[in-house]
Image: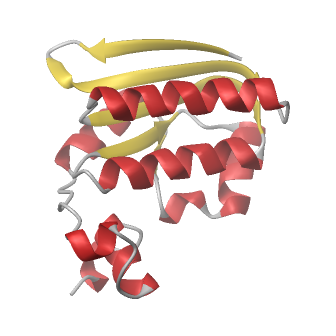
Amino acid sequence: METMITEVAGDPAVTVLAISGAVDVGPEELGRLSQVLDGLVAEGVRYLVVDLSGTEFLVSRALGELLTATVRLRSRGRDMAIAGASGAVAAAARKAGVGGMIQLRETVEAAVEAVVQRQVRPVPRSLSENRGNAGDRCQWYGFVKSDARK
């Protein structure tokens, strides 16, 4: 797995993380992915687009890392999208049901547009501390269609 982090020209609020190669089940690869994502969240990245167009294979645990990063970003009023997932990667994302939780787009440009236009509400303190019911947390984290929100 190789990674490259860039900012989008003209919009410094958007960071693109390009991942290429295979993200396998090895603890070293997953640990590295987790470190990169944790670092970006800690740095205060506003919008993150993960470009998977160069990724040949992605295990479900790697998708779990992406979901965790999405929740952490949204709990801070930020957001993330995935771009370029195709073939086996897209099939794994569909099988895991990731499309209902993370925005999936065909290109980096489409993902940037989608993530910037989406309005992410800051999570109320009671929900960010895991109080409240799971349905409320899902709605606030954006895992429910916007027309279903209260």
Colour mode? secondary structure
Percent coordinates x, y for residue 116 in the rendering? 21, 41
Is residue 50 visible to the viewer in this orientation of the structure?
A: no
Question: Compared to 96, does 41 lie above or below?
Answer: above
Which residue is nearer to you in this view: 72 or 90?
72
Q: Quadrant of the N terminus?
A: top right
Quarter-of-image position of residue 5? top left
Percent coordinates x, y for residue 111 in the rendering? 36, 38
The residue at the point 23 percent across, 35 percent down is: 46
Question: Compared to 60, does 46 lie above or below?
Answer: above
Q: Quadrant of the C terminus?
A: bottom left
Percent coordinates x, y for residue 71 in the rendering? 42, 55
Left or right: where does residue 38 sit relative to residue 75? right
Which residue is nearer to you in this view: 88 or 73?
73
The residue at the point 59 percent across, 25 percent down is: 53
Question: Compared to 8, does 60 lie above or below?
Answer: below
Is residue 148 visible to the viewer in this orientation of the structure?
A: yes
Which residue is nearer to you in this view: 124 or 20?
124
The residue at the point 30 percent across, 84 percent down is: 148
The residue at the point 34 percent across, 83 percent down is: 136
Percent coordinates x, y for residue 14 in the rendering? 26, 27
Left or right: where does residue 64 sit relative to residue 92? left
